[in-house]
Structures are given as C-alpha cells and as structure tokens.
Amino acid sequence: MKWKKRNVRALADIICGNDEHQKLFRYRSSSYLTEFFEDCDLEYVHDGSTRWAWVADRLEEVFAQPHSGPNLPPTAFIRIIRNLLAQTEAAEGDGDRIKALAALNSVLTAEGWEAFYDEHGISQLRHVATNTIADVANPHRPLTPAELRRRDQLTAYLDRCSEDELIEEVLLPLFRQLGFHRVTAFGHKDKALEYGKDVWMKFTLPTLHVLYFGIQAKKGKLDASGMSKPGSANVAEILNQLTMMLGHEVFDPELNRRVLVDHAFIVAGGEITKAARNWLGERLDATKRSQVMFMDREDILNLFIVTNIPLPKDALRAPESNNFDQDIPF
C-alpha cells in the first residue's frame, strides 16, 4: 500500500487536528497522539518531534504492514479510520459527522478509497474501483507482529488448558464476539442433560430467522486412528455425540419452547485430521453431513486474534505439565 507524500501529510494533519481541521477533528497534542494510536492497538509513543511529520512516518509504517491484497488495506489502517470517524468524537455543529466524513474523504478518494457509515453508524472503508469493503476481522489475512505475539501466547495456553477452560475461556468469548447469542455451556460436572452438546447457541440472520447451533469440543487432536493416544480423541467417539446432538431438542427460554439444533460444530483445541473428517463424513447421510462444520486449532487462533478478544486471564502464566486426559465418557 503506497500513498503519495502529500496525501500522507494531509491525513497526518487530520489526525493531529491541525489548522482548518480543528473545527471537525480533535486537536491532538503529544500525549493525545500516543493515546490515539493506543486506541488503534498500535504501540506508538510520540517522541516530542514535529507532530505531523511523526504521524506521517507512523502512517508509512502502517502502510507497510502485511495485508491480504491491493484492495484490502492493513487492519491497523482500518482501525485508524474508524477511530477518526467515531461518533463520540463529533465536533460542535457536526453531530452526525457528515462534514468530518467529507473532509476525510477528500484525502481518501485521492488514493482510491472512500469512508462511509453503515446502517449501524459504524464507519467502513471501501475500495472505490472494486467496491470492496475492507473488513477488520478477516481470519485469513496476514497478522501483524503484535498479533503474532498474542497468537503464540494463546497457542501456549491451548497446550495446557483443560477442556472446560477451552470452552469457558476461549470458545464462549469467541462465539459471542462473532455475533452468536444465548451462548450456553453445559459443562462437564453433570453430563446427564448434555446429550452430546458442550455448548448450544443461536444466530439471527438479517431476515430475522433464527438458526440453532450445538458445539462438541475436544481439547486435543481429533484423529481416525484405531486407538486414541494421549492428547487426542478418536473421531468414532464424536459420531455418537453428533447423532445425539442433532437428534435432541434444546429449550429456548426466550421462545419458551424446545427446538432442534440446525447445525453442529465439531471443535478441537488441536488438529482435526483429514482422515477424521472423511471418516465422519462417510458415516453421515447427506442431510446430516451438510449440518456439520469443523473448527480446529488454526481456526480458533486466527478468529480469536483478528476479532481482538482479550486473552484468557492466565494465558501468560508459566506453562505447566500437560494433562490431556480431560474427557469424561458419557
């Protein structure tokens, strides 16, 4: 991502709130510039030099960060734009921030981008030529160095956490952040009413139709070997649990009635081997096969990091000896 120098300076002036921009954007002194970039999850601390020049240099660093393609800017840049256009930063006489939006777009459009507010009042960034909307939470984009450090910390946590901790500390916050609601964990203390589900939840479509999901979670690797090894689970164990999950109703207290699960997530804190996926798919009929979705460690790590969810509270503690024998049979 390469910008002309004059446009980089123009954007830097907006961030600083210099000159005519003071009427629409907050004037930011040294400490407020540091605070601004902290709000954008960037570890930049102003060094006391000329503000606009320092901000321009930081923008150049942001532009050099990894991104998915020419039509998708670095995630940090999207956060900068959203921070600039936050509704809480509205100036007097520009409560809806239409003037601020126009001023910022006068710079962005010169580089082929356009900012706009969606129906929820959240600022979005669009590539004008392709009409592509940049998305912060793309789990397949390259990660920044700070995100890679958080990913390593979460990886270490997944190596030592229990199955209950995987569910409570990782999966529940993740699915809530992704827009699922009524996310309910059954837990492993009393499995009498679990019926193959560790978690159930629901998701409301834009049409207001509701889909119900069940999750069967395993802490370690999920494979198709004849005998389960320490740290792994056999996919044959999942088949019975999956059949129970899809065939048993859950009670939705918001509707005061029982409903069937529409889709099932098979989630593993380790790898789900290709052989395990194929074995399970071969033993399900076409209808049930279309209801099953897999999520392994790579999916969990990428989604957890790009959605910027806080790490579990003890993710930084010293590693302990792994205890893989977490499952209690039904």
Image: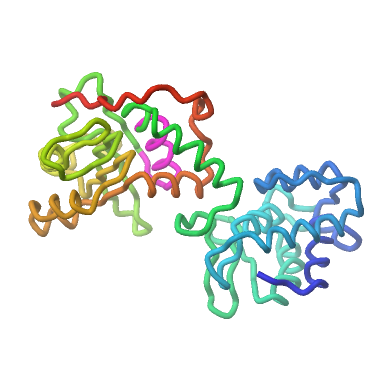
With respect to residue 246, does 191 lie above or below?
above
Residue 28 placement (x, y as % from top left)? 84, 49
Residue 314 placement (x, y as % from top left)? 50, 25
Residue 22 in sight from this viewpoint: no
Q: Nearer the viewer, residue 153 or 240?
A: 153
Residue drawn at (59%, 57%) of the image: 75
The part of the image, by quadrant, that contains residue 218 is top left
The part of the image, by quadrant, that contains residue 43 is top right
The residue positioned farthest toward the bottom in the image shown? 129
Q: Is residue 140 left or right of residue 328?
A: right
Residue drawn at (74%, 52%) of the image: 90
Q: Give the range drawn in magenta.
A: 167-181
Tell me the chief SS of the magenta region: helix
Q: Would you say residue 168 sits in the magenta stretch? A: yes
Q: Is residue 117 left or right of residue 47?
A: left
User: For the N terminus, which image quadrant?
Assistant: bottom right
Residue drawn at (68%, 63%) of the image: 63
Q: In this view, does 157 lie to the left or right of 50?
A: left
Residue 303 placement (x, y as % from top left)? 44, 48
Residue 118 in sight from this viewpoint: yes
User: For the C terminus, which image quadrant?
Assistant: top left
Residue 178 placement (x, y as % from top left)? 42, 47
Residue drawn at (37%, 37%) of the image: 171
